[in-house]
Image (cartoon, rainbow, N blue to C red):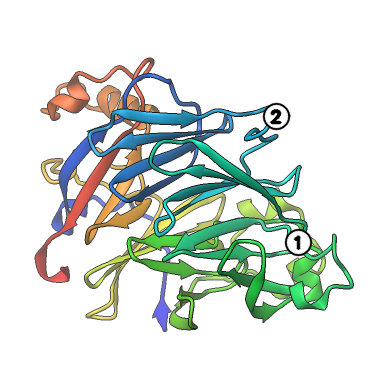
Amino acid sequence: MIKVEVESSDFENLGDFLETASYIQLAAEPLLTTIQQVQIKNEKIYVQDKLDRVICYDMQGNVLYKIDAKGNGPGEYTDVNTFVVNEISRELVVFDNFRQSLLYYNADNGAYIRTQKLGKPDPTAMASLRGVYYYDNRYHNNYPNDADLHYSLLISKDGTHMQQRYFPHGEAESSYHFTPGGPFSYNDSVLYYCRTFDNVVYELSPERVNALYKIDLPSPLPFSKIKDKANEWDLIKSEYSIGLEKIYRCGSLLYFQFSKDGFLQLGLYDLARKKQIYCGRRLADKAGRAVPVFRLIDGVYKDGFWGVITPETVDYALSEEPGKDYPDIFRNYNPDTDNPIIAFYNVIGGLH
């Protein structure tokens, strides 16, 4: 059991636990809109933005290709609801919810390969690891009589046929169309899963689902609120903790996020000492030497954390402390014309 308490103060000692190892400046063209999802696999960075594009970069931030294929023709889609990279088959798979289809592209060069119909399930999120596909299947409204699909987690070897099923649907949760957090968290070669409104973190593999952590959040959302289909915005602003997501581990340092009191709460926990380091609204390095600019952790790559630093984050940092001795990548940054930066962090001290 990991017990968490929200603190009222900001945490300014992040530099005692993390140090920035390197940065990747994503090429300025094409200019990205709001980022929806980022994956780092096979020495490539895949970014989905709000314009339903997937742009692939190398590890120096150069554009290798982009998939921008909204339309009605072969290899085109209505929307990119989500995407995954199958690192075994080296395919990038886009899920188009409107057409209930999976579109397959070459993950190395972006070439269109094929389209497969996915009539069932109707996933809210998907992931892929070691060639296997995982679907978060919150609802079964579109197939009420197909009891084999009334499960929250479905696993498929080929993307369309479900071989394994976990967590039978509760009717109250399945009929409540509110998804406050992302269920899948990529930890490099390990995949974590946490169901909506739950606090147990599972490690997924093709063979089994293994419960790893139970995170005891303060004032967890009562089931009665789910059953009564409470107003979503009221819940986000409430004192209840919801939406446990982005759960990443390096060494004995565990990072996670959830919402409470209308704010995103960030948690750091020392698994070795079974002790909370911090849980609250803001992580920062006051000294600014180890971590000059920080936003969020978005994944694990080669035994280190990484996170996207948005133009808004850089702009805020530069305006707050304009005289600070920032690295050149920030001092030469133009928030209006430059794309986000990917920062990579090493865990330091006794936590690694």
> Residue sitting at 75 percent across and 72 percent down?
149
* Residue 46 in the figure: left or right of residue 345: right
Tell me what residue is drawn at x 48 percent, y 82 percent.
Answer: 207
Give the x, y percent position of residue 225.
74, 67
What amino acid does circle 2 point to?
Gly
Q: Is residue 150 among the parts visible in the rendering? A: no
Q: Is residue 2 visible?
A: yes
The dot on residue 242 is none
Comes first in the chain, label 1 or label 2:
2
Please name the residue shown 10% across and 65% down the image. 349
Query: Which residue is disc 2 drawn over?
Result: 73
- Disc 2 is placed on an element classified as loop
Residue 107 occupies which quadrant of the picture? top left
Relative image position of residue 203 (x, y in whole percent): 44, 75
Vertical placement of residue 60 versus 96, above or below: above
Mark 1 to mark 2 CA distance (whole Å): 23 Å
* Left or right: 48, with 235 as reference point: left
Q: Nearer the viewer, residue 199 or 92?
A: 92
**Residue lying at 39% horizontally and 28% vertically, measured from the top left:** 312
Residue 223 located left or right of residue 87: right
Please identify the quadrant where the C terminus is shown.
Answer: bottom left
Q: Position of residue 170 (x, y in %)?
A: 76, 77
Numbered label attached to residue 120: 1
Q: Is residue 187 left or right of residue 131?
A: left
